[in-house]
Amino acid sequence: MGCDIILFMKMHELGGERNYKEIIDLMESMLKIFPNNSGLMSCLGTTLALTGDETRRAIQLCEHALKECTSYKGRGTIYATLCFLYQQSGNTEKAEELARSLPHARESRELLLPNFLKQPDKDAYLRENLPGILSTICMLIDGSGEGTDDVEQLRSIMFGTYGMLIDPMDATKKIAEFFSECN
């Protein structure tokens, strides 16, 4: 277990530096030792997708990882990655079909966990997570999540981060404006 954590930390360090070649080399060498490790396969597939190289192989790795993965969180990451890989490979219908099969946002950790936390932990958790959620919603409204930003969305999935955060008050205004345009 300790080795997994060290490997994960190294992958995050290299990813922060956008040193994808080193991540690919590291994952390739680790897969020789642990050929059925779904986390390694998924990480390698996502990293290949981030480089824009070998999309077909990235899809194969992630689809195989999905068969091996028993972790709910791991499977969610693989599903999200596959949606972008299918899109990247020109298979928009498959990306949409897979995305439609995923749980609703209301079934996510960010929206469920606050129901079970006591104060002040509940407020702290919401303050930590709402800016990312609101920023992501604004990105969808602006259309900035389409096309060329697929790589940034994959980075977000792989490294568990949100893109550029918008001030929550500005995000709220943008969301309100979006809904006022619908009326």
Image (tube, helix red, strand yellow):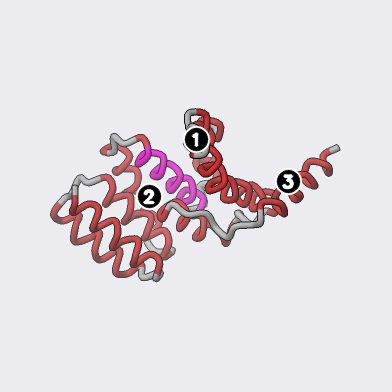
Callout 1 secondary element: loop
CA neighbours of label 3 inside 10 A, class few (<14), some (14 to 19), many (20+): some
| Image coords of residue 90 (percent x, y) | 52, 52
Q: Within 10 Å of the Cα at label 1, are there few (<14), some (14-19), or many (20+) other Cα atoms? A: few
- Which is more N-terminal, label 3 or label 1? 1
- Coordinates of residue 40 in the picture (x, y in percent): 26, 52
Viewer-side residue, 127 vs 90 = 127
Q: CA distance from mark 1 to mark 3?
A: 20 Å
Depth check: 144 or 82 in front? 144
Reading the image, the residue beneath label 2 is: 59
Kind of residue sitting beneath label 3: Ile
What residue occupies the far right of the structure in this picture?
A: 183
Mark toward the viewer: 2 or 1: 1
Identity of the residue drawn at 37% across and 60% down: 48
Which residue is disc 1 drawn over? Answer: 108
- Return the residue at label 3: 175
First reached walking from the N terminus: tag 2 or tag 1? 2
Residue 58 can be seen in this image: yes
Q: Nearer the viewer, residue 60 or 104?
A: 104
Q: Quadrant of residue 30?
A: bottom left
Decide: few, some or many residues near mark 2? Use Cα within 10 Å; few <14, some 14-19, many ≥20.
many
CA gap, disc 2 and disc 3: 34 Å
| Residue 169 to residue 105: above or below | below
Q: In the shown orientation, is residue 25 left or right of residue 84?
A: left
Residue at the left extreme of this rendering: 33
User: Which secondary structure dominates the residues rendered in magenta?
Assistant: helix
